[in-house]
Image (cartoon, rainbow, N blue to C red):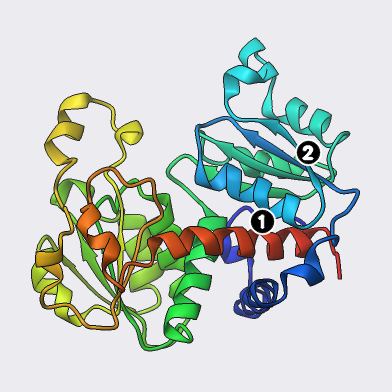
């Protein structure tokens, strides 16, 4: 494994090994403090990000390495018309590993074909976000003790939500996993994902627009925001942006051991009143993102 572009490039066994390493990092941080001394991570973010970019940077610093890069396309030679391929070839001369976010689907794949150093896809358009999926999997594993026999509710923007698409693909490989897909008609999961993953693997799933009715059966509730940047017109966004707002009242009939996840940023789809509920795990999820990215950097750099 030289690059990570799509979560499905990783086997269940490889994911298990990464989670094992991440758990060891959490338990024994001092053991990993100098593992990447002398190594450099380049963060090439052609699209805005807070958590993912800072998480990668924090991960590399905590491994004893260094970071260089840019946080928006206008800060790079892309603003002058430089191609992704040329940018990658250039940065590969300065860094040992690259984390790249780009608004165009497939851009990290193109980059990986030209790069002499490992490329990590940090999100490409509405397509893939594999390190967020690894973050989600580490969180689910720590919350539930594993991945089998879980009912997962995914709520909000299931059409454009790349985190949703990646998580469904990843979880489809475990046993007795059921999905409840909660969205307005306009933001339903894409047909290709239903056909290629859910139907092809004969997985149990249901589609509904009613969050409260679905709530009692859920072990995991994965909330998402309606993403303004994915819409082609303002009117559609304004009409759909408040489709689901999770409040304490809506958790009234939820399981006591429900885990509420959210890839963040949150706009208003989860009330801040939910933050104090012990079932809210989205800020712990943020913390887990740093540890799983540390484990991934170690793997791709082949650091023992």
Residue 240, picture quadrant: top left
Would residue 39 appear left or right of 109 to someone viewing this image? right
Residue 4, labelled with which disc?
1
The residue that appears at 28% across and 42% down in the rendered structure is 267
The residue that appears at 77% across and 50% down in the rendered structure is 118
Residue 117 showing in the rendered view? yes
Q: Nearer the viewer, mark 2 or mark 1?
A: 1
In front here: 30 or 91? 30
Could you tell me which secondary element the residue under label 2 belongs to? helix
Q: Residues within 10 Å of mark 2 (few under 14, many from 20)?
A: some
CA–CA distance between discs 2 and 1? 14 Å
Residue 31, labelled with which disc?
none
Residue 213 vs 40, above or below: the answer is: below
Residue 219, picture quadrant: bottom left
Residue 114, labelled with which disc?
2
The residue that appears at 74% across and 58% down in the rendered structure is 297
């Amino acid at each position: 494994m030289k690059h990570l572009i799509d979560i499905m490039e990783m086997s269940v066994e490889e994911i298990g090994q990464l989670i094992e390493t991440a758990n060891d990092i959490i338990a024994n941080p001092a053991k990993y403090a100098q593992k990447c001394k002398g190594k450099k991570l380049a963060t090439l973010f052609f699209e805005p990000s807070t958590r993912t970019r800072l998480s990668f940077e924090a991960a590399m610093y905590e491994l004893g390495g260094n970071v260089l890069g840019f946080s928006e396309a206008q800060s790079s030679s892309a603003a002058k018309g430089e191609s992704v391929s040329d940018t990658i070839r250039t940065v590969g001369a300065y860094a040992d590993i690259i984390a790249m976010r780009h608004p165009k689907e497939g851009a990290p794949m193109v980059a990986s074909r030209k790069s002499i150093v490992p490329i990590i896809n940090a999100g490409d358009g509405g397509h893939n976000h594999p390190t967020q999926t690894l973050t989600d999997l580490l969180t689910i594993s720590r919350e539930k003790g594993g991945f089998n026999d879980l009912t997962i509710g995914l709520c909000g923007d299931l059409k454009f939500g790349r985190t949703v698409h990646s998580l469904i693909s990843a979880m489809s490989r475990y046993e007795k996993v059921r999905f409840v897909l909660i969205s307005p008609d306009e933001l339903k999961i894409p047909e290709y994902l239903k056909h290629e993953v859910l139907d092809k693997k004969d997985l149990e799933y249901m589609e509904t627009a009613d969050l409260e009715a679905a709530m009692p059966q859920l072990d995991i509730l994965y909330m998402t925001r309606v993403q303004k940047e994915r819409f082609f017109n303002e009117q559609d966004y304004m009409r759909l942006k408040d489709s689901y707002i999770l409040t304490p009242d809506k958790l009234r009939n939820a399981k006591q051991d429900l885990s509420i996840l959210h890839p963040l940023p949150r706009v208003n789809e989860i009330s801040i009143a939910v933050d104090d509920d012990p079932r809210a795990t989205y800020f712990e999820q943020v913390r887990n993102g740093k540890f799983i990215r540390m484990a991934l950097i170690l793997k791709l750099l082949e650091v023992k």
